[in-house]
Amino acid sequence: MKLQRNASLQTFNSFGFECTADEFVIVRDVKELEEALDTTEPITILGEGTNVVLKPRIRGRVIKNAMYGISVTETPSDGVLVSVTAGVNWHELVRYALGRGIGGLENLALIPGSVGAAPFQNIGAYGVELDQVCEDIEVFDREQHCLRTLPASACGFTYRNSIFKSVSRDRFVICGVTLRLGNRDLSTHYRDVAAAVSTRSRSSLTPTYIAESVIRIRRRKLPDPRLVGNVGSFFKNPILCDSAFDALRERIDIDGHPDSSGVKVPAARLIDEAGWKGIQYEGAEVWPRQPLVLVNRGEATARSVLELASRIADDIHRRFAVELELEPDVIGSF
Ligand SMILES: Cc1cc2nc3c(=O)[nH]c(=O)nc-3n(C[C@H](O)[C@H](O)[C@H](O)COP(=O)(O)OP(=O)(O)OC[C@H]3O[C@@H](n4cnc5c(N)ncnc54)[C@H](O)[C@@H]3O)c2cc1C
């Protein structure tokens, strides 16, 4: 295990923020992970850093999970089980599955980041969420000091949330994910996807065609983090109770989508209506083609991005009485 002290994490987060960790170690298997966890220092787990806002200093040990491996473990009659370790890049997994004619991940194409982080916020896009294809998660349990397999039903998956992000935060390190793929109908109900496939007959649609459409939509709307620092959506879409949704509809003409705990409304529509598209603040900017995304124009810092986010959230609350919640994890201290 190679431990770096006072390590710069600037190249390990997609905002490109300068951040120094007391200690930094990259782990490639469970043995190295166990070794890295054997410390009294506070621990932070990092994947590819595409959903974190790193403040300038992280106390303790940052462990970057780089465990690598994909295999088709079983082909039961009801789909294909694919097991993937945490360090695999998510889009590489999508391409691996599509390349073998296995559907199920096409709507989740081109989401940046690692497989290990996908359960953390139950990644989702274009009408599909990880929990719809997740069979189980292999974790290292820091309380019991052993590897365990948690069935998806025990992971508390909801919209952009899980036990890993909430009640069991810091207890589990995700080491691998098993997905059940190839057993679902294609999902084309999401508006942008429906429009992209509207000229094709249903029978001629393939998972690869959907993935290519999703990739085109994403490239059009979202900044490429390799070129413009960002972490994707900065806010979650708020979920309102029926009466709050009715009250909101009196202020703005907005669509809502039923969710298990209420009505989900597009935060981008609220931010756009409030006039924030393209607004810049100390090097940070509200992305003009998708106002849920805040970008680093080169000079932004964790402080300026968080201040911009807080101004937007305050404004949305004042105008629409809706609370916006941050989607990325804010880590470290000023
Ligand atoms: C351009 C862009 C578009 C995006 N689009 C989407 C989208 O459509 N849908 C979506 O859901 N997300 C989206 N995201 C957010 C991001 O891609 C996902 O959240 C992704 O899963 C983050 O992966 P990561 O490896 O970079 O995680 P990191 O940013 O490194 O970590 C995120 C969190 O997960 C925790 N974590 C990471 N790995 C592990 C592990 N092995 N065990 C336990 N905890 C862990 C970290 O501690 C941290 O709190 C987008 C981001 C960008 C930049």
Image (cartoon, grey):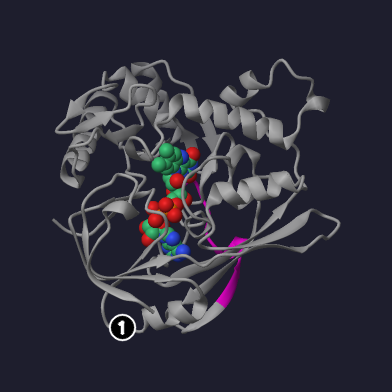
Query: From this viewpoint, is residue 256 visible?
Result: no
Q: Is residue 144 above or below residue 196?
A: below
Instruction: Examine the structure image and report whether residue 156 is included in the region drawn in magenta.
Output: yes
Q: Which residue lies furthest to the right in this view?
A: 77
Give the residues in magenta. Answer: 148-160
Q: In this view, does 33 lie above or below 313?
A: below
Q: Which amino acid does label 1 sit on?
A: Thr
State which quarter of the image contains the C terminus.
Answer: bottom left
In x, y percent, where is residue 277? 29, 21
Q: Is residue 282 left or right of residue 255?
A: left
Query: From this viewpoint, is residue 153 visible?
Result: yes
In x, y percent, where is residue 60? 24, 72
Q: In which image quadrant can residue 34 be found?
A: bottom left
* Of residues 145 and 267, the one drawn nearer to the viewer in this rendering: 145
The residue that appears at 16% across and 30% down in the rendered structure is: 281
* Of residues 192 and 324, the one drawn nearer to the viewer in this rendering: 192
The residue that appears at 55% across and 27% down in the rendered structure is: 216
- Helix, strand or loop at mark 1: loop
The residue that appears at 34% across and 46% down in the rendered structure is: 14
Residue receiving disc 1: 39
In x, y percent, where is residue 196? 63, 21
